[in-house]
Amino acid sequence: MTDRNDLPHVVVVGGGFGGLAVVKALAGAPVRITLVERRVYNTFQPLLYQVATGGLSPGDVTYWLRGLRLKQKNVRVLHEHLVGIDHDARTIRLANDEHVSFDYLVLANGVTVSFFGTPGAKEHAFGMYSRSQALKIRDQLFIRLENSAFTPATDDGLRVVVVGGGATGVEVAGALAELRTAGLEPAYPEIHGDAFEITVVQRGTDLLKGFHQNLRSYAAAELEHRGVTLRLGAGVAEVLPDAVVLTDGTRIHSDLTVWSAGVGPHAEVDDWDLPRRKGGRVAVGPDLQVEGRPRVFAIGDIAETPDWLPQLAQPAIQGGKAAARNVLALLEGRPTEPLTYHDKGTMAVIGRRAAVAEVTAPGLRAPLRFTRGTAWLMWLFVHVMSLIGPRNRVTTLAGLVTRYGFPFHRRPIPIVGDVPTVRPEK
């Protein structure tokens, strides 16, 4: 009988889309796997904005990583934080000063919010790339709503500015508009509808860059129809505690600033002695091995391949599977193979019965494009089925149907957290 400690050791850093794809693809392989993740759970990031706006519980979009052991015995989950890599000794160093040796290393630790050096953004804007960040936004949202309701005569309402007009920014703005028009009007009679303003700030002249122009125009029209103000063509020069200053000098009052303008690598990646490309992403070859670092792979948002791939779930998942295949190829003495990325399209939801979707498939001369209810149903199916675990799928489906489905959408009850009591000043 083979001692498991004698098996080749594959260390996977990061329990997101890419990391889990690697682990699952090696389920039947003659290797032992250590999954290193700073959190004890996997987060389904495409639905974090629903948590931030009270549509879903944080438990709906998270999965306990040790649950992988129920079906896969060759994986060990290590709840720690990678701080250093010794490439010569082939070991990694964790935040608890533990050293873990590896035969193969796969970096899939993702990225974090990037404020691009914008003055005041880190201090006064709320990023949304983790569960804790989404919960902070949710709590701040309802704290400000309660304050506005408690002092209607002196308070000028609630002003939310969403920075970034990509898929995340559009979805956040759409969810806030849905919350305002359907959920808050009966619950907060003290706050008039026009006293809850939502503004999207986008440096470019269009929303949803990367989508077809028709879909961009549809998304913009839908948001404006739902009462969202679009400020296009100017970026953010500075974020203040109560305002956002644009590059054209415009000052927009903001009680809550949500930053969805971009992402970048974690700061600790600077200490890992890895080649980097523009934007700080790790430079990898066609087979996803880090340039100059044999048997070290990088996948997903942190990696940049020669054929640039978007920072989305599908490239991470396909990259994870490709990295696993190449690990097995090296084990068996076969040559590695380049990642062949199959673009399946992308989508974004705006609100009830409103979404945009581009679907691609082999044999199609051009992407199939959908809007309105058809795109919304496609978005719902893809996101629910992409969740890990049956409980997450059931509870998420129930939450989304309650928020958007007929007739529940007329009075959706948001999920709120801790909101301190509002008392008059003495």
Image: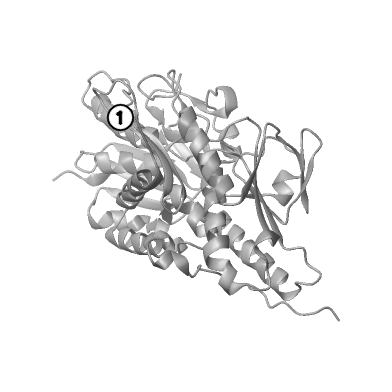
| SS class, disc 1 | helix
Give coordinates of residue 262: x percent, y percent: 59, 37
x 58%, y 23%: residue: 278
Give coordinates of residue 63: x percent, y percent: 37, 57
Q: Quadrant of residue 294?
A: top left
Is 281 on the left-hand or right-hand side of 7?
Answer: right
Can see residue 304? yes
Q: Residue furthest bottom?
A: 426
Q: Which of 337 and 165 is in front in this view?
A: 165
Image quadrant containing the C terminus: bottom right
Above or below, 159 relative to 280: below
Is 52 on the left-hand or right-hand side of 335?
Answer: right
Color encoding of the figure: one colour
Q: Which of 29 and 194 is in front in this view?
A: 194
Dot 1: few (<14), some (14–19), or many (≥20) neighbours within 10 Å? many
x 78%, y 54%: residue: 242
Above or below, 248 relative to 291: below
Q: Quadrant of residue 265?
A: top right
Give coordinates of residue 87: x percent, y percent: 47, 29
x 47%, y 39%: residue: 92
Q: Which residue lies furthest to the right in this view?
A: 426
The kind of residue tagged 1 is Ala
Tell me the residue that label 1 is attached to.
Answer: 322
Give coordinates of residue 143: x percent, y percent: 66, 68
Number of numbered tags placed on the structure image: 1
Above or below, 422 relative to 379: below
Can see residue 86? no
Q: Nearer the viewer, residue 76 or 370?
A: 370
x 77%, y 63%: residue: 156
